[in-house]
Amino acid sequence: MSKSIAVFNQKGGVGKTTTVINLSACLASLGKRVLMIDIDPQGNTTSGIGIDKNSLEYTLYDILINNVNPKECIKATQQESLYIIPASVQLAGAEIELTSFQGRELKLRECITEIKKDFDYIFVDCPPSLGLLSVNALSAVDSVLIPIQCEYYALEGVSQLMNTYSLVKKGLNKKLEIEGVVLSMFDGRTNLSIQVVEEVKKFFKGKVYRTMIPRNVRLAEAPSHGLSIISYDPKSKGAEAYLELAQEFLELSEEVI
Ligand SMILES: Nc1ncnc2c1ncn2[C@@H]1O[C@H](COP(=O)(O)OP(=O)(O)OP(=O)(O)O)[C@@H](O)[C@H]1O
Ligand SMILES: [Mg+2]
């Protein structure tokens, strides 16, 4: 069994990268083989897991543009069973260079098809845009995981997000599903957070994970040490939450397959 998931929301700073790194690390700690693919030119997943973006021989750019074999680009991380295809700022150029390619929306799908059987889960960290890199991600995966930040305007942009999802599902990737919606940066002391939870649940019906990720300063600190939260501070509230999310994710995703 093998599943690929795009972590997608075109709104910036909602917790996509934090979720990719920490959910992947938790799943790896539970014995799964996990690959993260960084398709964001910001390269936050790459640096956040401790990889120096300036010392890379190959990145995702080389797979998409130079036809380098994906297997050559997979790097091990400090954690057992956790791997990454890194990104560099070169990817920003890929968005433009790809436009002249035939099958430009399907380059990442070709990549994932070649390596899928080597992993239990593949998570793709999308950039905060609806451009060609995000379309590549949505066209390549089995499902989409949507992080939503518990703040005012949380649902702003969700209709464009769902529109892009529907267009890709209708055209390029008919099997695409919604994996789940995760509420991030939750603060149970504020009415606003509680109100956002209600609204999001109303909008996404049964798709919202029971586990919510609290606002936790340790989660914000971990990437500057190049570590996931379970390596940086395994006793923190953030680590507890992502471990619980990993367990819930496993229960639900293995049910669907
Ligand atoms: N639960 C949390 N508690 C505290 N800080 C958090 C939490 N989740 C994310 N952050 C912080 O909020 C900022 C945005 O998070 P993150 O980078 O994961 O969002 P993103 O959606 O990937 O952003 P972008 O759209 O720029 O790629 C980061 O500085 C991150 O460390
Ligand atoms: Mg990010």
Image: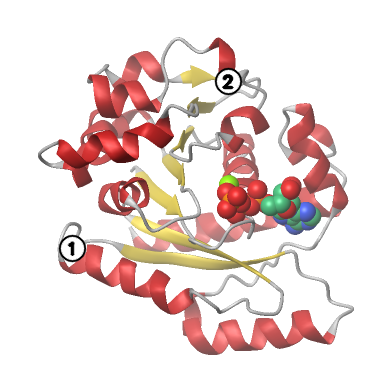
Disc 2 to disc 1, C-alpha distance: 35 Å
Residue located 42% across and 40% down the image? 122
- For the rendered model, the colour scheme is secondary structure
- From the top left corner, tell me how far across and down residue 156 is, in percent: 55, 78
Tell me where residue 69 sits by quadrant. top left
- Could you tell which of marks 2 and 1 lies nearer the N-terminus? 2
Percent x, y of residue 193:
76, 79
Q: Which residue is mark 1?
A: 174
Disc 1 residue type? Lys
Does dot 2 land on a helix, a strand or a loop?
A: helix
Which quarter of the picture shows residue 155?
bottom right
Q: Residue at x 85, y 38 (%)?
A: 233
Q: Which mark is residue 53?
A: 2
Between label 2 and label 1, give the one nearer the viewer.
2
Instruction: Assign the N terminus to one quadrant of the image.
Output: top left
Task: Judge: label 2 CB < 8 Å from ligand 2.
Answer: no
